[in-house]
Image (cartoon, grey):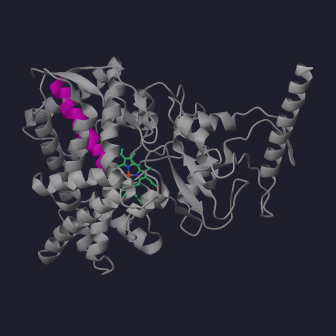
Amino acid sequence: MDFIISAVVLFILIFIFIRRLWISSSSSSSPVRSRLLGTMGWPFIGETLDFISCGYTDHPQSFMDKRRLLIIPVQDRYGICLRYGKVFKSHLFGSPTIVSTDAEVSRIVLQSDANSFVPSYPKSLTELMGGSSILRINGNLHRRIHGLIGGFFKSPYLKAQVTSEMRKLILQSMDTWKEDRPIYIQDESKHIAFQVLAKTLMGLDPGEEMEYLRIQFQKFIAGLMSLPLKLPGTQLHRSLQAKKKMVKLVLKIIRDKRMNVSPDSKDVADVLLNDKSEKLTDELISDNMIDLMIPGEDSVPLLITLAIKYLSDCPKALHQLKEENLELKTRKEDLGESLCWDDYLSMPFTQSVITETLRMGNIIMGVIRKAMKDVEIKGYLIPKGWCVLTHFRSVHLDENHHQSPHLFNPWRWQDRDMSSGSSSCFTPFGGGLRLCPGLDLARLEASIFLHHFVTNFRWVAEEDTIINFPTVRMKKKMPIWVKREMN
Ligand code: HEM
């Protein structure tokens, strides 16, 4: 008897489940033929809890894998479908969402302009960003600021200056390392990256103002993933207070610069101040200086930390990297020259290590866009108002695109030109109009760090694990024990 009741209950549950799939797969409001399958999960929370719980595992993409590889015979208008496929619908973080793990669909979304898709961020993040932040604005003003920032790193004079500043800060930090205690690579690289950003963005040197800015910035970013409640005592409120203090200091720096503006731009603020369009007010520039730190502050240290983690686990790659860097170091010493921007970025194996770290590490797991109108891509309908999560991580770890995707294999990138930052199967820096303008800076900083690290030190890494949610980081901050090389 029990068996019959269980069988009936199971049957009803399966029936309800399949019916929900059926309803959700055929409930498009548009006449456009849509192949989208998926479930919207529970009321309000949708499938968010499953997304988060998968996020905390070693395989955050298992949320996607479970759905795109789901074997359920669903009878839809077009026949029997055995899985949702690479693009499916869901309901995440309060929004109906299309999840794309398809390289081509994601590429088209990223390439689209603001008439079709605009960036979408969690509410707390939007609250903390300025209204004219490059991360939020669209259209001509966005294009102008993005172009100016991207252009900054193209000038030979600035390239030389940024390279020598970065080298100085990295070497200063390495000089303080002691052999009788662990060095926490994640913290060290974070400290350096902040100094590099403050210098590159607004010419700030280490000192009291930089330290004040660093402390306020830590309070500020603590609220990026917080509950969107602005009441006193909440994290978001504390972060907004910290932002106010930062804006006051940065605005003062910008105004001082405006008084003595020189035609030779020395940092990103100078480039924006020298813009002739008169659309870039001091408030807009100072807001953007702070918001530029959001994508820049954490990502580069993670790139460096993960590269060292993967190299520690792959002695063959470390050996080759060391050989390449030592060879260049000796050659430059013989010439009596120090390494320039192009030297650092032209070491092919070093760049392959960085590229492979970006592929495996997925520092930015994907980006979210919101559809401004019904958009059809490759037969999938994305309804107006829905979000699209272009999940880079799923593509980077898809064995159809990258053989043995979970293996750290820098050699796979040999003879492939990755200087443009992306191809549709490799998009760690996004793509289209919003392609990361800091990508050269990130590669350069990682290259300089790795160069001086592997040519000056041997090390033993302590056991540590990568955490992937809500942001990528090392559980123990990557402790290593170093010994200085006698060369
Ligand atoms: C490993 C390091 C980095 C990674 C993986 C990374 C990744 C990304 C990605 C995926 C995007 C695209 C976001 C989107 O499409 O919505 C982006 C945008 C952006 N990144 Fe980076 N980034 C890195 C370093 C930096 C640095 C160092 C800076 C600052 C100087 C920076 C500044 C920006 C800015 C301002 C945007 C927004 C561009 C726009 O919306 O037009 N990034 N980054």
> Dominant secondary structure of the magenta stretch?
helix
Using the image as rendered, state which of residue 110 and residue 367 is in the foreground: 367
Rendering coords of residue 437 (x, y %)? 36, 56
Residue 175: in magenta span: no
Rendering coords of residue 484 (x, y %)? 12, 22
Tell me the quarter of the image containing the C terminus. Answer: top left
Give the vertical position of 104 relative to 32 (above or below).
Answer: above
Rendering coords of residue 238 (x, y %)? 32, 57
Q: Residue at x 22, y 21 (%)?
A: 459
Q: Residue at x 20, y 24 (%)?
A: 182
Work out whether residue 331 can be spotted. yes
Q: Residue at x 20, y 30 (%)?
A: 453
Give the vertical position of 467 relative to 225 (above or below).
Answer: above
- The magenta segment is 441-457
Work out whether residue 161 can be spotted. no
Tell me the quarter of the image containing the N terminus. Answer: top right
